Image (cartoon, helix red, strand yellow):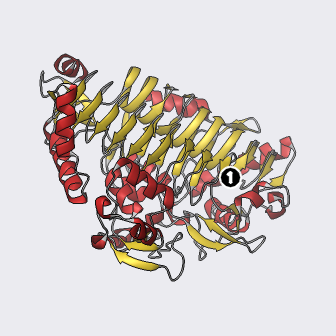
Amino acid sequence: MKTKSCRECWAKFEITNKDLEFYDKISPTFAWKKHRIPSPTICLDCGIQRKMMWRNERKLYKRKCDLTWKPIISIYSEDKPYKIYDTDEWLKDGWDAMDYGQDFDFSKPFFEQLNNLRIQVPRLSNNVYPYIENTLYCNLVWNMKWSYICYNCWYCEDCLYGHETFYSQNCIDCLHIKNSQVCYNCYNCNKCSHTFFSQSCQDCSFAYFSYNCVGSNNIFLCNNLKNREYCIRNKQYTKKEYGQEIKKLLTWKYSDTQKLLKELEQIKLHCIHRENSNINVEDCIGNDLNECKNCENTFIAYKTEDCKNILSVDSDVSSCQDMIYLAEAEYCYNWISVAWYKNLFGYMVVRGSYNFYCELTSNCENCFACIGLKDKKYCIFNKQYSKEDYEKLVSQIIDHMVQTGEWGEFFPPEHSIFDYNESVAIEYFPLEKWEVINQWWKWTDKEYPINIPEGMARIEAKDLPELEDLKDEMEKKILTTAIICEDSWKPFRIIKPELEFYIKYNIPLPRKHHDIRHLERSKLRNPIKLYDRKCDKCGINMKTTYSSDRPETVYCESCYEKEIY
């Protein structure tokens, strides 16, 4: 084991013998020469931050397709230097990324030449995949029906303002929920129904303002309950008593709802927390893991094995390291959004193997520094080569990259296709504008309300009526008026299905822009970082996402099970 200093933040980090074995195993051989992957030069946090700068999930803009000149919605603002095609046009065979092929110039740095290719090759406007029906203003979605302003979601129906919402129906303003229906303003819930303003609940129904409850129904302001029913503030009631109390508590006035949310935060502060949120794991160090084995520094992962430094895995990933947002991958390294086998250093590759420094490729194999290719082999900078010539030239390019210090590094932050505050990085690594500019990274001040028609009437959030005062004429006015967010002053709309949901389930009309609501929910996440801390019950050392200076009471797995269950 050896200790290194991050060249970005100077933090100390360790490289183990097991890490070195992994780098050696994935090191490629070209023209009978093995090109060893060097150990990282930056720490885990800086590595994740750098990759996140290449992923825009939530920022959408109006612009024109550079192929058809039709108006489109895109994750790229119109001032970006790239060619942007409507996603449907990009997926068609009417253009060929090979037309933009270029020779490698050994007198110039590798990343500079790759960035030049990046500017030339058309990119798809947003990541809206097949099987989409009546789904508007979305990104990174597939198998979606009748949904609106959703990001990184799939297999959903009738969902609005969802983020990381999967296999769910009729859910609004939710973050990181699965297999649920009729939920509002929920975070990290699974298999829940008719659940409102609740967090980290599983198999619950008719749960209100509750935290970390399992298999419980008809609960209100409860925490750490399992298989309970008709409880308020963790106190047992009869069915009749519960109904009477709920009528008093659930006024559904906006101000009262805000008071209940503050009470929920106090409940969370003073209740017992488990060291992690892992389920069915073996020999794992991380958080939010489900059916995982032999994983280290891994977060938000499902069916993952023998991985390290991984964030956000859908399923079936093994033997990968330093990756974020991936599925069905094996022996991949230093990548963002990838699937399949032995892909090293890149961005957004679908069903490919043995690709290096590639972007937006699908079904490709043995490609190096290619962008936008489909079903290709032995290509370099979007040019076709024979197998022998490919291996010879790649070997020479890697030798050149070793000399320039580029081999083994991820794409430079200054070449990111997005501005810092457009990317996911702003949520996990929040920085002020001046901090971003000082590092020579990019920042945008542009705000485009994509779903607000020009000339639409406006109303301040404080002037919105309570539901009991919402008469027919006022309903029509709400649907044809832009609301000015009480926090950001950004305009937002309430659409008809959304209003019908609020009325049906007595939800107060929102006073804040959906982006602000999302940011508030995203702050509920624990850091993607593990801290050394002692169990507040038995004193045993543990790794947890709760740092030792946080006020919550945190128990190890054993003590938590004894105390709660």
Residue 308 in view, yes or no: no
Residue 31: image x %, image y %? 77, 39
Q: Residue at x 57, y 71 (%)?
A: 77
Which quadrant, please, contains the C terminus? Answer: top left
Which quadrant, please, contains the N terminus? Answer: top left
The residue carrying pointer 1 sits among few (fewer than 14), some (14 to 19) or many (20 or more) residues within 10 Å by Cα, namely some
The vertical placement of 481 against 250, above or below, is: below
Residue 417: image x %, image y %? 57, 64
Q: Which residue is mark 1?
A: 360
Q: Residue at x 18, y 45 (%)?
A: 249
Q: Amino acid at mark 1?
A: Leu
Residue 367: image x %, image y %? 74, 46
User: Of residues 128 and 238, which is closer to you in this image?
Assistant: 238
Q: Is residue 93 left or right of residue 468?
A: right
User: Of residues 24 and 331, which is closer to you in this image?
Assistant: 331
The vertical placement of 41 against 436, above or below, is: above
Q: Is residue 183 left or right of residue 130?
A: left
The vertical placement of 316 against 14, above or below, is: above
